[in-house]
Amino acid sequence: MAIGDRVTRPGHVQYGELLLGPGTPYRWQSITGWEELPALDSGTVPRAGAHGAFPGLLLAQSRTIGLDGLIVRAPRATIGAVVGALNAGTVPVVDELPFVAWLDERGPLLAYARAVKRAIPVGKAYRVGVIVGGAVQWEATDPRRYELTERTATAGLPTDEQGLAWPLAWPLAFGTPGSTGNLVATPTGDALTHPVIEFRGPVTRPSLTNVTTGDVLEYDVPLARGDVLTVDTRAGTVTLNGTASRLFTATSRSVPEQTFTLPPGSTPLIFRAAPGSSDPSASVVVRYRSAYW
């Protein structure tokens, strides 16, 4: 199923396959930690011989999201099943699940989180199918929020144009246009985002360069036709065909994967390979989502 596929209107919150909000047995009154800036770790240090301090890095901590004032309503004959579905959808898990919230005209935003707290008060109204004052809390280790739709930018290796065929005959045919190996990533939002990069063979020593910063990701590895080298810059991993790590193939001019980010706006990128590696079937795909604080 697609991420956030059940979210169709403002007020909807989907965690995994659990949907809360309008049209469901689970209504909520407030959400905390969603529009707030997450807590920051500051690298600022005091000046030793002067007033003030030296500004340091500001690194965001995990985002804590709370859904408060939870109201559960169901026929008294099925209240147990409805509560059971809520419980089953908020159990402790190992891997974070998609958390999608749609609050207003800006549309839904996505985070990856795990449920860490759940409160379902049981009072007299429980017997008639009503629960008030419930709450669920999640923790997202990546504090950024993302657009639902994943964007992609693709390019092949540079190739020459075919040019004119002699003798000339009208109308002139210049052949298939060549490829420049250039591509552009255009995230919006207000935060840096980490792309996932896929180098597809046949290609030797593929590389991707950020023209603006000069940062390069390059791997001294031959890829056969059908091979895919995936670089997850958020996780800092490099895998061949989804299984074997190839992180050790990074060349000396390659930057650490987790430092290769895309800022909001337009970022020109260049796809290149080793001299003599020019198969037109080779390509790079850059996948990313716009990120928001």
Image (cartoon, helix red, strand yellow):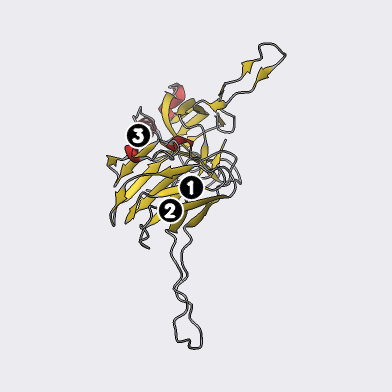
Which residue is located at x 46 percent, y 58 percent?
181
Instruction: Name, please, the residue furthest toward the top.
Output: 49
Image quarter in which the C terminus is found: top right
Relative to the observer, which residue lies in front, 273 or 113?
273
Can residue 2 be seen here? The reply is no
In the picture, measured across the screen, residue 95 lies left or right of residue 243, that is right
Of residues 157 and 19, the one drawn nearer to the viewer in this rendering: 157
- Considering every residue shown, the one lying at the far front of the view is 275
Marks 1 and 3, how far apart at CA: 54 Å
Tag of residue 81? 3
Residue 183's spot in the image, x, y percent?
50, 55
User: Disc 2 versus disc 1: distance between alpha carbons?
Assistant: 8 Å
Amino acid identity at mark 3: Ala
Q: Is residue 106 above or below residue 55?
A: below
Label 2 close to label 1 by CB (< 8 Å): yes
Pointer 1: what residue? Answer: 209
Residue drawn at x 48%, y 36% as measured from the top left: 259
Please state the horizontal and vertical placement of residue 240, each as a whole percent of the image.
30, 45
* Mark 3 neighbour density, 10 Å: few (under 14) some (14–19) many (20 or more): few
Position of residue 289 relative to residue 38, above or below, is below
Three-letter amino acid code at the position of disc 2: Arg
Which residue in the rendered view is the most extreme toward the right?
A: 51
Q: Which residue is mark 2?
A: 272
Q: Earlier in the sequence, mark 1 or mark 3?
A: 3
From the viewer's side, name the closer residue of 194 and 171. Answer: 171
- Badge 2 marks a residue whose secondary structure is strand
Number of the front mark, 2 or 3: 2
